[in-house]
Image (cartoon, rainbow, N blue to C red):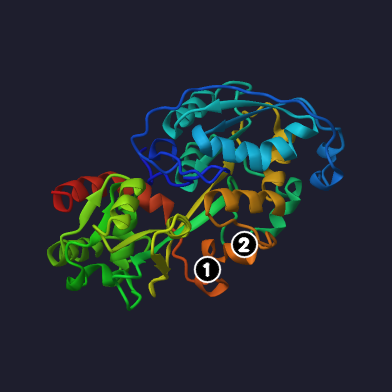
Amino acid sequence: METVMRFLIDRDLSGQPLSDEVQPENIGRRQFIRGTGALLGVGLGAGLLGHSSAWAQQPGGELLVSNWGGDWNNNVINALEQPELESKGIKILRDLAAAPARKTKILAERNLPRGSVDVAHFTDADAFELNQQGVLEELDYSKIPNASHLLPGVQKPYFIPFYISGVVLIYNKNKIKTPPTSFADLMNPEYAGKVGLIDQIYFNYFLAMGLLNGGSMSNAEPALEKLRQLKKAVQPRIYPSHQQAAAAMASEEIWITANYNARAAQWKAEGLPVEAAYPKEGAIGFEGGVCMPKRARNKDNAYRYLNAMLLPSVAQKIAKATYYAVPIDNAALPPEMAAIDFTPEQRSRINRVDLGYTAKNQAAWLDWWNKEIKV
């Protein structure tokens, strides 16, 4: 089953942007070179262990992590895996590839006594699909004590979020003096020829524009009329990737778009004169994170990984490296990073995607998008 678009992450810890080819969010990526790596270290602090008897033993052994490659994998190594696991005695092996190949591997191993993957990084959409196929472990939250700090609404029985964001409006503040307030502003005739949309996240536009016409996260049919109106009113420019949309924003080819809040923070940090505007309809939410296959060999170490992932120190590093918000309430991000996050009031109005509905309709939406909007 083809599911919701893949999302996220575009900077490494040195502050350099990634190419769009290595983003978790991108559809049509070239498959990453697969590889493994391992580092050894010593000890594991008792603060990571939680209260389960399964954690009484000293850490050690192996853990196979399935992940995207490129700088995203480097971010995870630097923020989480090396300081919290490898340096404390766990040998991490890495299976790096694009999401479709890694999903196929987990599905192929479903009937084996033991699989090869212990924890896997996916978007919420990919994890939903795998859970529907019955291959993911129902997590024991007593073994993930740091999960007590997860934000309301993000906890799932089979998936722990690691980074979160939402689709908002991003505009050139030098060209648009009155901040936009609604997804309807994308149809403003004053912006004709200056509106940019992005193929990679097209399904978000169905959900966003549907909200303008009585739709919901479980009913995007009203979006069709609004998208036709948008095309007629402003003739939007369609870009294949976030990177190309950023270049168009920099050159002032476009003045406004709808994209992840993290992109606004990133582009602003890179010197573009942009601001994010939270739409009155609410942002369209997104989560990326980690799940555990049922056939995992090293479940104790997998739980250590999930628990460490939710440490404030790890959250701070990931947020700084990627400009994406984090799903815990005790991250204590510094004031200068406030732009990457939503306020509590904005969080309360995030539209959480109905993953089942979106997965069922994505193929039809893509066909309609290509025939009605891109042409």
Q: How many labels does the image show?
A: 2
Evaluate whether residue 68 shows in this view. no
Picture coordinates of residue 284, whole percent (x, y): 41, 61
In percent of the image, x 83 and y 30: which residue is there? 42
Q: Residue 137, image x and y in percent? A: 61, 38
Spot occupied by residue 308 in the image (x, y as percentages of width and height): 71, 45
Q: Are marks 2 and 1 in contact (CB under 8 Å)?
A: yes
Provide the residue designation for mark 2. 151
Residue type at mark 1 is Arg
Point 17% across, 49% down: residue: 374
Residue at 73 percent of width and 32 percent of height: 86
**Secondary element at image label 2:** loop
Label 1 packing within 10 angstroms: few (<14), some (14-19), many (20+): some
Query: Distance between the Cα atoms at labels 2 and 1?
Result: 9 Å
Q: Which residue is drawn at 32% across and 45% down?
A: 241
Specify the quadrant of the image occupied by residue 46. Answer: top right
Q: Can residue 107 be seen in this view?
A: yes
Q: How crowded is mark 2: few (under 14 residues within 10 Å), some or many (20 or more)?
A: some
Task: Locate residue 7, reporting x and y percent.
Answer: 43, 46
Mark seen at residue 347: 1
Q: Left or right? Give the position of 231 relative to 312.
A: left
Amino acid tagged 2: Leu
